[in-house]
Image (tube, rainbow, N blue to C red):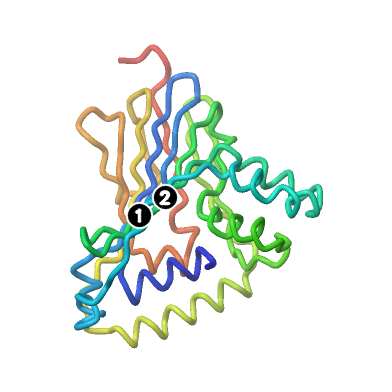
């Protein structure tokens, strides 16, 4: 299932909380995790009597590189360009849990990196798993934006770039229809950026950002539907204090 469609379904038919967390070390290395969690109170409103009929338990963890090895024959038939993209995801760890008994439906995608520029677009991981398994070309994907990160000097940037304006318009219109359909429901649809830095924060581009007491971490919360309709709204620039400043 395509991750953008998957997120869209969760947002407006099951409700979803998505959190992107980055821990950045002084040398520029660190870790990133993207986690999406089904919000049970919201989902219960929509599922109604079907909520109590759920009967599922799955708990799986894997590394993306495992899929490359498992489907090596398929992988070897893809273009060199596609192979190079897939290989960048080799060390991404995926954990998925779906438990109707514990009422926990959660997916997480994590990566350790030596440089912020090495962070891959974790929002595409489910699509790429399907591409390798089913031998699909990346050119067939319907992604409409890319996410990139940089950390140079005292400046950290999260940059979203629209790569397919036509697909963006389709998604925008589809979300508008679903918003109308589910109007009146009290659904949790949050998208949160949680970033932790090695030095104190001097300034941040988004005025809604909440800087923690130690001034070394921040959080910004958005409405998930807004992020899908206007991905560039999640662009962020953070300026840290120079090294040596306490």
User: At x 44% / y 20%, what residue is drawn?
Assistant: 26
- CB under 8 Å between callouts 1 and 2? yes
Q: Which mark is residue 135?
A: none
Q: Position of residue 9 (x, y in %)?
A: 41, 73
Q: Which mark is residue 60?
A: 2
Task: Note whether 21 is above or below 26 in the view shown.
Answer: below
Task: Note whether 67 is above or below 99 in the view shown.
Answer: above
Reading the image, the residue beneath label 1 is: 97
User: At x 45% / y 66%, what residue is drawn?
Assistant: 228
Q: CA distance from mark 1 to mark 2?
A: 6 Å
Q: Between residue 132 and residue 142, name the one nearer to us.
A: 132
Q: Position of residue 200 (x, y in %)?
A: 33, 26
Q: Between residue 197 and residue 114, name the one nearer to us.
A: 114
User: At x 50% / y 40%, what residue is drawn?
Assistant: 157
Q: Is residue 86 left or right of residue 9?
A: right
Label 1 or label 2, whichever comes before in sequence order: 2
Q: Quadrant of the C terminus?
A: top left
Q: Between residue 26 and residue 141, name the one nearer to us.
A: 141
Q: Position of residue 221 (x, y in %)?
A: 30, 54
Q: Position of residue 17 (x, y in %)?
A: 31, 59
Q: Is residue 193 left or right of residue 120?
A: left
Q: Quadrant of residue 44?
A: bottom left
Category of crowding for the residue at label 2, using alpha-carbon neighbours closer than 10 angstroms: few (below 14), some (14–19), many (at least 20) = few
């Amino acid at each position: 299932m395509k991750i953008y469609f998957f997120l869209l379904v969760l947002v407006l038919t099951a409700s979803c909380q998505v959190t992107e967390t980055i821990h950045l070390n002084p040398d520029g290395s660190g870790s990133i995790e993207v986690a999406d969690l089904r919000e049970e109170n919201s989902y219960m409103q929509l599922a109604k009597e079907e909520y109590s009929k759920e009967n599922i338990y799955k708990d799986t963890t894997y590394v993306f590189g495992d899929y490359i090895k498992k489907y090596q024959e398929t992988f070897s038939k893809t273009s060199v360009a596609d192979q190079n993209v897939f290989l960048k995801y080799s060390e991404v760890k995926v954990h998925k849990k779906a438990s109707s008994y514990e009422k926990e439906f959660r997916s997480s995608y994590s990566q350790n990196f030596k440089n912020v520029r090495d962070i891959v677009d974790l929002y595409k991981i489910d699509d790429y798993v399907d591409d390798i398994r089913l031998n699909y070309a990346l050119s067939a994907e319907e992604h409409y934006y890319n996410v990139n990160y940089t950390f140079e000097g005292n400046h950290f940037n999260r940059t979203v770039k629209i790569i397919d304006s036509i697909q963006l318009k389709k998604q925008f219109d589809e979300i508008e229809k679903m918003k109308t359909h589910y109007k009146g429901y009290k659904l949790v649809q949050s998208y949160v950026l949680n970033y932790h830095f090695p030095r104190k924060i001097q300034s941040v581009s988004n005025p809604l950002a909440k800087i923690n007491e130690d001034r070394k971490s921040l959080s910004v919360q958005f409405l998930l539907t807004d992020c899908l309709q206007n991905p560039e709204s999640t662009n962020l620039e953070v300026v840290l204090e120079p090294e040596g400043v306490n």
